Image (cartoon, rainbow, N blue to C red):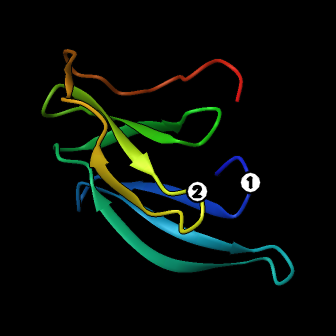
C-alpha cells in the first residue's frame, strides 16, 4: 500500500510484473490501473520506500533486486532507477527509514 493509501500493489509471478490498483476508500474497492514488468523472473517480495518514490522488487529466478520509480499521483511504476543488484535467490525485501 502506498504511503498515501491511494494505491495498492501486488506481485504476479506468472506474469513477472507488479499489478497496480487505485483505492476508493469511500466504497472500499480497488480499481485496476495497470501493471509494470519487473524486468526479471519470478518477483517474490517487494516493498515501497518510506516516501513512496520507489518500488524495490526481488526477482527470485533471475537473482536480482531492482528499484522501479513510482509516480505518486498516478501510482504507476516505470523505468528502473538503477541497474539491478545481483543477489543469489532473493525472496523478500525490507525497506527501513523514514519518509
Left or right for 16, reference 50: left
Q: Residue at x 47, y 77 (%)?
A: 33
Q: Residue furthest right?
A: 26
Left or right for 90, reference 96: left
Left or right for 38, reference 63: right
Above or below residue 90? Residue 13 is below
Above or below residue 27? Residue 44 is above
Above or below residue 45? Residue 41 is below
**Structural crowding at the residue carrying mark 2, measured as other residues with C-alpha within 10 Å and reported as few (<14), some (14–19) or many (≥20):** some
**Looking at the rendering, in which quadrant would you find the C terminus?**
top right
Which one is nearer the viewer's eye here, 35 or 51? 51
Q: Secondary structure at mark 2?
A: loop
Q: Nearer the viewer, mark 2 or mark 1?
A: 2
Q: Quadrant of residue 64?
A: top left
Q: Quadrant of residue 29?
A: bottom right
**Structural crowding at the residue carrying mark 1, measured as other residues with C-alpha within 10 Å and reported as few (<14), some (14–19) or many (≥20):** few
The alpha-carbon separation of the residues under discs 2 and 1 comes to 8 Å
Q: Secondary structure at mark 1?
A: loop
Q: Residue at x 59, y 65 (%)?
A: 73
The spot of residue 57 in percent (x, y) is 36, 37
Q: Residue at x 23, y 59 (%)?
A: 14
Between disc 2 and disc 1, whose residue precedes?
1
Q: Residue at x 53, y 42 (%)?
A: 53
Q: Which residue is mark 2?
A: 72
Left or right for 57, reference 7: left
The spot of residue 85 in percent (x, y) is 22, 21
The mark found on residue 16 in the picture is none
Q: Kindly check if marks 2 and 1 are in contact, taking CB atoms under 8 A apart as contact.
A: yes
Q: Which residue is mark 1?
A: 4
Amino acid at each position: 500500500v502506498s504511503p498515501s493509501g491511494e494505491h495498492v500493489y501486488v506481485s504476479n509471478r506468472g506474469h513477472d510484473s507488479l499489478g497496480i490498483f487505485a483505492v476508493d476508500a469511500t466504497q472500499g474497492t480497488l480499481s485496476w490501473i495497470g501493471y509494470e514488468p519487473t524486468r526479471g523472473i519470478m518477483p517474490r517480495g517487494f516493498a515501497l520506500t518510506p516516501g513512496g518514490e520507489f518500488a524495490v522488487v526481488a526477482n527470485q529466478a533471475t537473482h536480482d533486486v531492482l528499484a522501479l520509480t513510482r509516480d505518486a499521483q498516478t501510482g504507476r511504476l516505470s523505468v528502473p532507477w538503477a541497474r539491478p543488484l545481483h543477489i543469489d535467490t532473493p525472496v523478500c525485501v525490507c525497506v527501513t527509514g523514514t519518509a
